[in-house]
Image (cartoon, grey):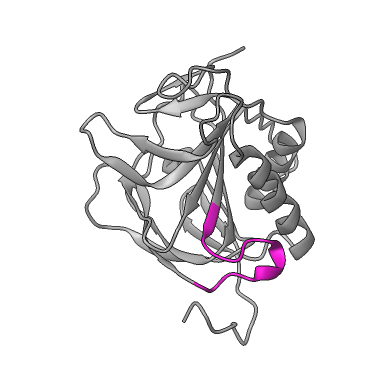
Amino acid sequence: MADIPALVPRQRARVADGAVHVPDWLDLDEQRRLVEACRDWAGPRPSGQPGMRATRLPSGGVMSVRTVCLGWHWYPYRYSRTVDDGDGAPVLPFPDWLAGLGRRAVAEAYQDDGIDYRPDVALVNYYDDAARMGLHQDKDERSRDPVVSISLGDACVFRFGNTENRKRPWTDVELRSGDLFVFGGPSRLAYHGVPRTYPGTGDPAIGLPRGRLNITLRVSGLGS
C-alpha cells in the first residue's frame, strides 16, 4: 500500500524501452526547495489572475489538475510565449537551475553523463484528492528529446501505456515523492496518465501538506 513504507528499498526499473523509473531520486531538502519554487510560480500574476489554474479543453471540459507553465505556455494543443488562454501576459521564465536538474535527471535515468539535454519548458501540475489525468501523448513539441517527470507530495498511480492508442498494454507504476520518471527514444510518444492519487501519503516535511505536484520538463524544439 502507498501509505506503508517499504521494508526494503525500491529499485530503479526499466518500464519500457527508453522509459526508466528511479525511486527516491530527490532527498527531502531537494524536495522542499522544489515545493518552495512551485509555490512561487503558482502565486498570483500581476493581472490578479492565479498563476496556477485549470486548463479548458476545446471540447469545453476543464482539466481537474491545475497547471502553471515555465518557458513556454502550453494550452490545447500548442505552445506560446504568452498566456493566450488567460491574461495574455508573458509566460514565466524557465530558470537555468531547473534545466540543470533536467540534465542531471536524464543522466541518472540513462546512466550516461554525455547526453546533451536542454529542456526549455516545464509544466507544473497540482493534483488535489480528486484530480486525475487521462491517457495522452506529449506530442506538441517539435523535439523528441526525453520527457522528465518529477513527483512531489502524495503518491499516485502512473499509467504508462503503448505508443499506438489508449488501450492495453500498459504498466501501472506507483510514483512517490522524490521519484523520477524519464521516457524517451521508442517510448517518447507513449500514452500515459494518472488514474488515481493516494491522498495523505506525502511527507508534510517537504512543505506540501496535501496533494501532489508533478514537474514535467520537455524540450520544445521551438527555438528562441
Q: Is residue 11 left or right of residue 169?
A: right
Q: Can see residue 59? A: yes
Predominant secondary structure, magenta span:
loop
Which range of residues does the magenta coloring cover?
200-213
Q: Residue at x 24, y 57 (%)?
A: 168
Residue 59 position in % (x across, y down): 20, 33
**Residue ranking furthest to the top:** 224
Q: Is residue 111 left or right of residue 6?
A: right
Q: Residue at x 65, y 69 (%)?
A: 204
Q: Residue at x 36, y 39 (%)?
A: 137
Q: Can see residue 163? A: no
Q: Is residue 61 left or right of residue 38?
A: left
Comparing 98 with 14, the one in front is 98
Residue 62 position in % (x across, y down): 30, 41
**Residue ranking furthest to the front:** 48
Q: Quadrant of residue 93?
A: top right
Q: Is residue 129 left or right of residue 145?
A: left
Comparing 130 with 221, the one in front is 130
Q: Is residue 110 above or below residue 175?
A: above
208 inside magenta stretch: yes
Q: Is residue 57 above or below residue 214?
A: above
Residue 3 position in % (x across, y down): 52, 80
Residue 121 position in % (x across, y down): 58, 30
Comparing 222 with 35, the one in front is 35
For the C terminus, give its image quadrant: top right
Q: Is residue 37 above or below residue 14?
A: above
Q: Quadrant of residue 152?
A: bottom right
31 inside magenta stretch: no
